[in-house]
Amino acid sequence: MASEKQPRQRFVSISLRVVVFMCGGILMAVEIMGSRVLAPFFGSDIFVWGSLIGVVLAALSIGYYLGGIIADKVPRFSLLGAIIVAAGVYLLLLPLFGPSVCESARQNFEIAEHATPIPPLVACVILFLLPGILLGIVSPFAIKLAAKSLSTVGGVAGALYALSTLGSIIGTMLTSFVLNSYFRQQSIITALGAVLVAVGILALATEGYAGGYRLPAWILALVVLTGGALAFVPKPPALGLTYPTEYEVLEEAVSPYHQIMVVRSKVPGTASRWRCDLHFDKYIESGIYLNADGTAPAEPLEPATDYTDLLHLPMIFREPESVKRVLFIGGGGGVGPTTYLRDYRWVNVEVVEINREVVRLAQKYFAFTPEGERIHTHILDGRNFLRDTTNAYDVIIFDAFSTGGRPPFHLLTAECLKLARERLTEDGVVLTNIIGEVTGPRSRLFRSEFRTYCSVFGSGSCYAFRKSKEGGNIILLGTKFARRFDKETLVTQARSALNAGKIKIRLLPYYAEYYMSPADADLESVPVLTDDFAPVDMMVAY
């Protein structure tokens, strides 16, 4: 009798440890993946991470409390297994309703003209509070099942919580460093749900084995039927994309930074005009027009995102032929570098792009050539490249964005701009492309970056240009020229260069009309952005 009981006790002990370890790992994996679920709708800023961490901690607190109460009343492996299976089924279904919840939160809880954490917080509560509570129940429940007496409960609790934390560490690193680089977010979340269901079944089987009886057939049948039904659940649309016209997702790719998609769509209001867009999550990063049959980029390359024309503004500050070396920090679809190579046959271009997948897709779909006689591409962080390079450039263009039009803050600070200024030739120009407005609450990022430019280049050497009267894409420029250019001079120089064929961007004189000097903006009420203080996320409204 004792010989039969000992193997069962050993199996129960191992089973509990596996359950605690796996649930701890999956909980943190879900938290990491939560950021990818929210990113297409809210970005990946401090609001999103603050909401995720806060909701998960709240869920654990509730789960720990409920787990202790429930385990005292019903200390059964079958109940623990049922709770874990419920959490797994929830995760299996989450990709189906997650995008709708996020979009609803974004539309219904947004506070106009103010950056606010409320929409992502609401989405986090709806999506992740319940599975967090269910998984939080596991550890105290397991302690109750494992403890043999009060004299040993401390050691049991310590060992199981340590094991749960170890699982959390491994789950965090595995998801961040491996899974996110090779699999789609929906596939990862579905796999996490399936693993949880398997862990729940292990807990159910443990009760049967420990008690010396078989599990009721209906429990196993329910698990099998649930898994079978989920196998036929329709796959949700990729990132919930909607286009007003016919469209097709040409390719999806995963990366540590975004879920990337290439989408071909018919241009609204046309019978046979097609375009190809590069999406970082739900947001369009680059776009080009295709041939009439929709199969290849038009020749010559025609950008479908007209903001790229603004990247040519440095050419109106000096003779275009004097610009020999240009650096792009942020490659996107490669439209900016490609148009520079197309329009200025004497220019050599370097591109710094942190995401290797972006370069691959730009080459495949957007006619971008990463390596050639006049172009070289570096897979690297832009700030690190500026720190390490010894090259000097006539023009440096910052056109890097994270999700939702948010520039990486470390590319906006005074320290970064000083690095860029040091890498300029004697008459060099630095340009930063940001998205915002020129007045009102949503102008804070533009005004702060404008003030930061002035702190580095001096107010007499800084300029701003906007795509429209309200804003949209706003170009900030800092020069090493000794003279100050007024609007009339720049418009005249733009028209002259256009008429002489030295520049090809037809609307460049028009964009020069939307000239702003530091005196035209309220810069005193906003801070200079530094590595020590750069609240970019707080400045960018949804």
Image (tube, rainbow, N blue to C red):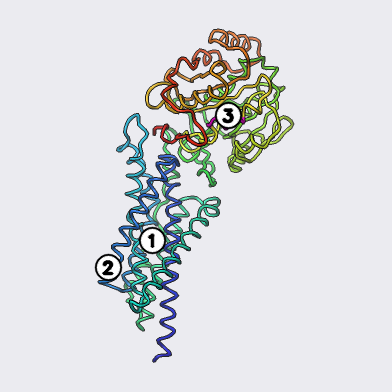
Span colored in magenta: 412-419
* Vertical relation: 134 (above or below) 45: below
Q: Which residue is drawn at 34% across and 69% down?
A: 141
Q: Is residue 337 visible?
A: yes
Is 417 a magenta residue? yes
Circle 2 SS class: helix
Q: Which of marks 2 and 1 is nearer the N terminus?
A: 2
Kindly identify the amino acid type of the residue bearing the numbered disc 2.
Ile
**Residue with the most extreme left position:** 73
Q: Residue 417 carries which label?
A: 3
Query: Neighbour class for label 2 at 10 Å: few (<14), some, many (≥20)?
Result: some
Q: Residue 88 carries which label?
A: 1
Kindly identify the amino acid type of the residue bearing the numbered disc 3.
Leu
Between residue 282 and residue 243, name the one nearer to us: 282
From the image, state whether disc 3 or disc 1 is nearer to you.
3
From the image, state whether disc 2 or disc 1 is nearer to you.
2
In the rendered image, residue 473, in percent from the top left (x then y), is placed at 48, 25
Residue 441 falls left or right of residue 329 = left
Q: Earlier in the sequence, mark 3 or mark 2?
A: 2
Query: Neighbour class for label 3 at 10 Å: few (<14), some, many (≥20)?
Result: many
Q: Which mark is residue 70?
A: 2
Residue 225 falls left or right of residue 366 = left
